[in-house]
Structure formats: C-alpha cells, structure tokens
Image (cartoon, coloured by chain):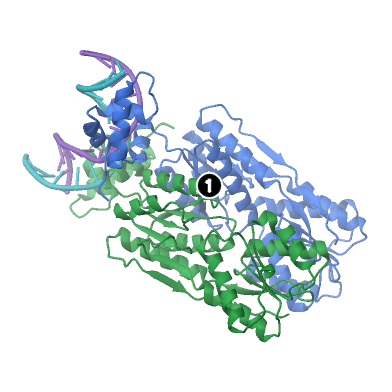
Chain colours: A blue, B green, C purple, D cyan
Amino acid sequence: MERVTMADVAKEAGVSKSTVSQFLNKRYEYMGEETRRKIQQAITELGYQPNYLARSLKQKRTSMIGIIVANIKHRFSTEVSHAIEEYCYDADIQAIVCNADDDPVKEKKYIEMLMAKQVDGLIIFPTGKNIELYDSMIHAKYPVVFMDRKAGDINLPRIVSNNIESAYQAVEHFVKQGHTRISIVTQSLTITPRAERVEGYKRCLEDYQIDWNEDYVINNPISDLQEELEKMFSSNHPPTALLAGNDRVFLELLKFTKRKEMTIPDDFSLIVFDNIQYAAVSTPAVSTISQPAAEMGRKAAELLLKQIQKEPVEAKEHVYPCELVIRET
Amino acid sequence: MERVTMADVAKEAGVSKSTVSQFLNKRYEYMGEETRRKIQQAITELGYQPNYLARSLKQKRTSMIGIIVANIKHRFSTEVSHAIEEYCYDADIQAIVCNADDDPVKEKKYIEMLMAKQVDGLIIFPTGKNIELYDSMIHAKYPVVFMDRKAGDINLPRIVSNNIESAYQAVEHFVKQGHTRISIVTQSLTITPRAERVEGYKRCLEDYQIDWNEDYVINNPISDLQEELEKMFSSNHPPTALLAGNDRVFLELLKFTKRKEMTIPDDFSLIVFDNIQYAAVSTPAVSTISQPAAEMGRKAAELLLKQIQKEPVEAKEHVYPCELVIRET
DNA sequence: GTGAAAGCGCTAACAA
DNA sequence: TTGTTAGCGCTTTCAC
C-alpha cells in the first residue's frame, strides 16, 4: 500500500506537479510533445494512480450522489435506483445507494453521513419524519430530489405516481367485472402512497355506490398480514377481488393462498401494484399496476444533476401515471 | 451551499482549530468543561457539519469499501451484497456496490475508480479477465477478497460454493427418481461456477452410467435460451428433468413453459440453483439448490475488514456447501 | 488543557 | 509552454 503521488511522477518526469496535473486533466493544448511523453512514461513506470479524494477536496465536488431508499426490499426501489445509476453513469457520476429500512433514525444518519462525505446531491425516498433536517437542506440550498412520497409541504422537486387514480382504475376494473366484495391489502399507512391507494380505492367504491366495509381494508405490518388475511377470508363474505399494495404484500398473499390451498383467480381475482418479474410468466399470470419506475428514476436524476450544475429547478411535483396491465391467462 | 468549517467554529467558540478537532474526536480527557460547552454551542449555532473528505485525506482511510458484483440482476449477488452491507454497518464502514455487468472493461474501470476514491478495500465477483490488474492489487498489498468465482490461481482469499458437488446431488436426486433424460441449462460457461455445475452434472451421469447426450446440455446467453429450449424440447427424446443454472435461467424457463403451455412438474421435473423468492410460495413449489449467500457475504466482509486492520489473512479458498431443498407441493 | 504549525495530494491562478 | 504558490478542511505532533 505504498502510495505514489503526483510529486513522485513530477520528479521522475523532471517537470513540476502542476504540469502533471494539467496532463491528467487532459489540458494538453499548450503542452510540449516531449513533456507529454515523459509524463506518460513516468506514470506507467511508477504505476501512479491519482487520488480523487484530494482532488475532490480542492474542487469541492465529489462526482458522487446519494440515493436513500426507504426499503431496498421493494422492487420499485431497486428499479428506480437502477435507472438513476444508469443515468449518472453516462454523466460520469457515481450513485451510492443507502437503505433507510423505513427507519427515520437511519434515514437521518445516512443523510448526515452522505453530506459529510460531500456527495454532490441526494435523491431521497423520505420517511417523512425528519422535517427539520429536510428544511435545513433546503435552507442550505443543498441539491435534493424527493421520490415516491410526499413529506409535509416541503418545498422541493419531487417525483410521484398517480396512486389515487391508479387504485381507482384497478377497483373500477373489478367493479366492471361484476365484483362487489373488493379488498385492498397494504402495509401500514405510514407513508403517502399507501394512504393514497386506499383513498383511490374508497373513492371508486363510493362513486359506484358499492356497499362499504372496513373489513375489506387491511393495512398492517408484513408480519401481521397472515393473521389479518385469515380473519378476512374466514368471514361470511370473503372478498372476491383483491388489490395488493406492493410486491411484498403479493408474496404474503402467495404464502397465504398456498397454505390455504386457494388458487388465484379461482378463489379471488387479483391486481398487484408494482411490476413484479414473475407476474407475466407465472401461470396463471397476475395483473399488475406498473409504475414507470425507470422513467421516474431518470427524471429524478435529471432534476438532481441540473441542480448540481446550478441550473434553476422548479420545486414542483412531477406526477407519473401507472399502467394497469390486465393478464388473464 | 455556504460551508461552515472548523475554523468558523473555532473562532465562534474562541478556541483554536485543534481544540475543536479534539472535541469532535471525543478526546475530551484533558478538556475544560467550559471549553466543551462553548464548542458544542458554536457547533449547533452555526449548524456545522464536519467534512469527512478532508479527514480521510489526512487519515488515509475513508471507511468505505467497494463491492464489484458481476451482475446485479442475479439474486445471489444482491443477497451477498446485502449481507456484506449489514456486516459493515456494524463496523461503521460503508459499502458501495458497483455493477460490472459481466464486462471486464467495466470491471477494470470500477476497480480503478474505487481505488482512486481511496476505498479501504474491495470485494470482487471477478470476471476473471483482468489478471494483470488483480496481480497489481496483490502486489500493492491492497485488501481484496474474491467472491463466487475462481480467477486463474490468483493468490487471494476467496469465497466459493461447492458447485460440483451440489450439481451432482441434484442430478443424483433426479436419477433416483427414475429420470434418465436429464438436462442442464445455464448461461455461457465464461465463469467458473457455471462450468463447475456442468462438471458435477456430467460426473453424476457418468457415475450412474446414464446415456450421455450433448443435446441435453445448454449453455448460451440468456437471449438465445428460448430458441435452444425449443430445439431441445422438440426433439424425439425431450428431457424429463431439468437443472436450471440460476434465477435468470429459471425466468426464461417459465417464459418458455408458458408459451408452450407446458407445466412443471407435469412436463418435466425442475431444480433451480439459487434460492429464488417465489420458489417456496409458487404453486407448485419449485425445488432449489440454495447457496448460503448471507453467510458467504459475512465471511467475505470479515476477511476484508481483517486485512484492512492489517491482521494477517490467509490467501486460501473458503468453500461453502449448498443445500438441496426438495419441494413437491 | 490548549494552540501553532506542518502537511495529507491535489488544483488553479498567476508569473515567468 | 511550464513552474511557483497558495490553499481545500482536517488531524496531529509538539510547544507552551
């Protein structure tokens, strides 16, 4: 681990550090052919590797951005992160993904750590609980984009799906198929998208004047879902159609139906939020509400990089429509 | 984005920079009660955030390690990475994941980038094609652990699964069930684990003196699999049992069976390498060969952190046995 | 107990 | 065209 520095290269090549620096930054314009050759040779000879840390300290940019996902186990998070990474790769920027695990304390810790590491900006799936911290970032004019969730009326650019409308559409599809006992199952309503999906669900039922029943609305931690499903399906009027709030809920549902020897769609119809990989290839296939995750990720990256380049970015909400993909085979 | 530096805090508190530095590093032993209070107050008042970049430059450690996964789309990679991250989190080290996308050029680029960023060490799923670079890392005594794949006889600690034995076991299971037309489907044999799985497959068939047929061995890029499967299954003697090399091959298989209206296990028996999420809950369930990904990740992290702490680490191979999970419901 | 000063490896004026 | 110089924000002896 003995380090070769620019000074070593300079000495070896018989030039000054600044000339080497010029060379490394490809400012060859005014550089003698001979000097260039000597420097190149010294570099290969010594096996010199530049130290970006020192450069970043000087330049006050690290060419890194941070992504703080709420929970890395959600497929949506990974799809979005992947799109962000790709976008950044083309701009020679590196994206670092941190998993807040739905924990505001961890979120705070990661935000502070990444800022201390001087990353140039942050894309956050906010837990919504660190209002003070969010405010201080705005105040410091630190580049930030919020993803997926609304957090108070924070004055930041943010990317969201049209959850209310999408849930509405899915339920409407069920209604038009003749279902009247329709359930929605999500994790706890601690974040806005889940609440919005329930909201869309309720609105649709009201619009179609369908008998309303709180027993059909489950919103509990993953660990409680088996029990809750059991309760719901053992009632006198089990649902005939079900909207699952995300991929993790879907997994729990599969677990449940397997245990109960039920089958989809014989025992109930299903639509799942999130474009799960196996939905299209499983038999029978599963209908989904697919969020344009890649597009949303790219937009977030674009808005962030603009801010980093000091271009003005409006602090508004960008709403992306989801696509209801009905699969019946 | 106006920065508050240690100098500002020092001035505000009426002490020197070094005292503030002591304070931040919790070396209060010889620090006056009053001084401490003043510094604390200045920090909160100014909203000071330390700059880890500067600290790292000085200390020559970044408390970051890099993970270079061969392909992030493999579930095994994400499971391993996750375990590494968790292990590091407890040691207050941050892990950065980069995706080489099975491309030696990208791998090289990422290795160099991470080293330039001065990460303290690297865990690599090697493509196996950058021998020179691997050698230079060994020579520089840079902390590295190899994961999943063997690359030449590189003199580094490495973590692998017992691929040959596991594939052997799976095939043996098929044989004992009475199958004689057994196929193995993997991606191209460019990396050691895949070749080893085919090796184990062949050995078992030989040991049981089962008629040997190259048509049952498919190893092609994902994009060619549909075509190859089509060829194999439309022959006079289609296989009755199949070993899928990983989760991505499994997905292609599902796509294929759906298209052909075949069902598993009616049309053929299946065992899949990798502990896929849906295997246990899908109906019918899918048998798997599950690699102890989390354990392997933790071990890799442990070996890397040891090296970083300058503890001696043997450059040997750590072999982890997989578990054959037969699911028949 | 606290401060002064040197320096980590690099960049960017400005001089030459 | 190249070199000199002064930092970037922090840590760390070593004086006081």
* Chain of the residue under label 1: A
Quadrant for the N terminus of chain B in the image: top left
What residue appears at the point 49 percent right and 44 percent down from the top-left corner? A133
Measured as percent of width and height from the top left, residue B270 is found at: 69, 74
Measured as percent of width and height from the top left, residue B210 is found at: 65, 81
Is A60 on the left-hand or right-hand side of A130?
A: left
Q: Residues within 10 Å of mark 1 (few under 14, many from 20)?
A: many
> Does residue D12 sit above or below A142 in this rendering?
below
Residue position for label 1: A67
Specify the amino acid type for callout 1.
Ile
In the rendered image, which quarter is residue D16 located in? Answer: top left
> Does residue B196 sit above or below A82 in this rendering?
below
Measured as percent of width and height from the top left, residue A156 is found at: 58, 37
What residue appears at the point 27 percent right and 64 percent down from the top-left corner? B311
Is A75 on the left-hand or right-hand side of B42?
A: right
Viewer-nearest residue: A103 or B233:
B233
What residue appears at the point 57 percent right and 73 percent down from the top-left corner? B290
Is residue B325 visible in the rendered image? The answer is no
Is residue A298 visible in the rendered image? The answer is yes
Viewer-nearest residue: B60 or B123:
B123
